[in-house]
Amino acid sequence: MWITSSPTETLTPAAVALGNFDGVHRGHQRVIQPILNCVGAAVEESKGGTRLMPPALSSKAPNSRRTYATVVTFNPHPQEFFTGQTRALLTPLNEKVQQLINLGVQQLVLLPFDRELAALSPQQFVEKILLQQLYVQKISVGEDFRFGKGRSGTATELQAIAATYGIPTTIIPLQTCAGERISSSSIRQALQQGDLECVKALLGRPYMLIGSVVKGQQLGRTIGFPTANIQIPPEKFLPRHGVYAVRVLIEDATELGVMNIGVRPTVNGTSPSIEVHLLDWHGDLYGKTIQVHLEKFLRPEQKFASLEALKQQIQADCTITKSLFNG
């Protein structure tokens, strides 16, 4: 996938899905779907000149024309820009990129959200960004999409402005699951409650933590349960502290495990850590990047009277996890 934050480096013409897309949840997937259906052949010339394209795209048909399935989002998130407060993300950039690739998106445009962009009226946003920079051919947005100065523009206004230029706009109704609106906020709330069944239903997949294995205090080895200490992006949204049954993807293998997120009060820990004990793994994980898929919240983190009591509880957690996966 081609990723750019520079208007001069975008692949055009583009079929565009607009939004923040944090989580790339089932609602976001519905917004993205319409732009995947109008992809043509490759194009080498854009905006009156020849442009180098990513090899994966240009090698297919370098002399013919194509409409690129493009997700346009904002960096930083507008709320971060206006509040100055860092926003925890369900899908940090690398994870969002992978999810978009899985859907078939060919280009991600990260519009730098600054005072100049924030000051554009809805009409100016369509003309300067969508038409002059992206040569947009089709637009897809969610029903609740807002844009332009002071978030004054609505999805229906976007549709009307685009129509004056002959650009079709698809407005996707709000999506629901079990009567609840599918949104990034509802996913965060479910994660804080440890309701992974709800999270999976809203996302369309298990919630993931992706990170590299680093050296920890290696206390797990002393009680017979060695753990992999996972370092994840600092902006990643963490679920409720506690113990989880997980599936762990290591290169091409999938392993079962028990994960603890928390401060480890039994050993007087003070800062949060993420540790995974793999049930049937014997090998060196240091330096490897792994994906941890959260399948079931087992219990809250708690302080035990002794390491022996902690050991007995971890063994019970492992037994429960095996029964969950092996049915």
Image (cartoon, rainbow, N blue to C red):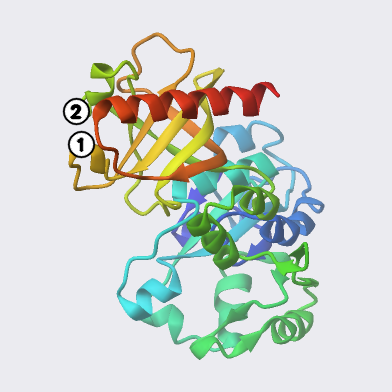
Mark 1, other Cα within 10 Å: few <14 / some 14–19 / many ≥20: few
Residue 306's disc number: none
**Residue under the image location 17 percent in, 41 percent down:** 268
Question: Which residue type does callout 1 highlight?
Answer: Val
Above-or-below relation of 267 to 199: above
Quadrant where the image shows the C terminus: top right
**Residue under the image location 29 percent in, 38 percent down:** 304
- Report the number of numbered marks: 2
Q: Position of residue 60 (x, y in %)?
A: 69, 32
Residue 217's disc number: 2
Question: Which residue type does callout 2 highlight?
Answer: Gln
**Residue under the image location 65 percent in, 40 percent down:** 102
Left or right for 40, reference 26: right
Q: Give how far apart the Cα atoms at labels 2 and 1 are.
A: 11 Å
| Quadrant assignment, res 308 | top left
Left or right for 204, reference 245: right
Q: Position of residue 48 (x, y in %)?
A: 60, 59
Quadrant where the image shows the N terminus: top right
Question: Which one is in front in this view, the residue at disc 2 or the one at disc 1?
Answer: 1
Q: Position of residue 193 (x, y in %)?
A: 52, 58
Left or right for 131, reference 253: right
- Look at the numbered discs 2 and 1 and tell me whether their residues touch, using CB distance below 8 Å: yes
Above-or-below relation of 209 to 191: above
Viewer-proximal residue among 15 and 151: 151
Q: Secondary structure at mark 2?
A: loop
* Residue, disc 1: 267
Left or right for 94, reference 72: left
Q: Secondary structure at mark 1?
A: helix
Mark 2, other Cα within 10 Å: few <14 / some 14–19 / many ≥20: few
Viewer-proximal residue among 318 and 60: 318
**Residue under the image location 67 percent in, 62 percent down:** 16
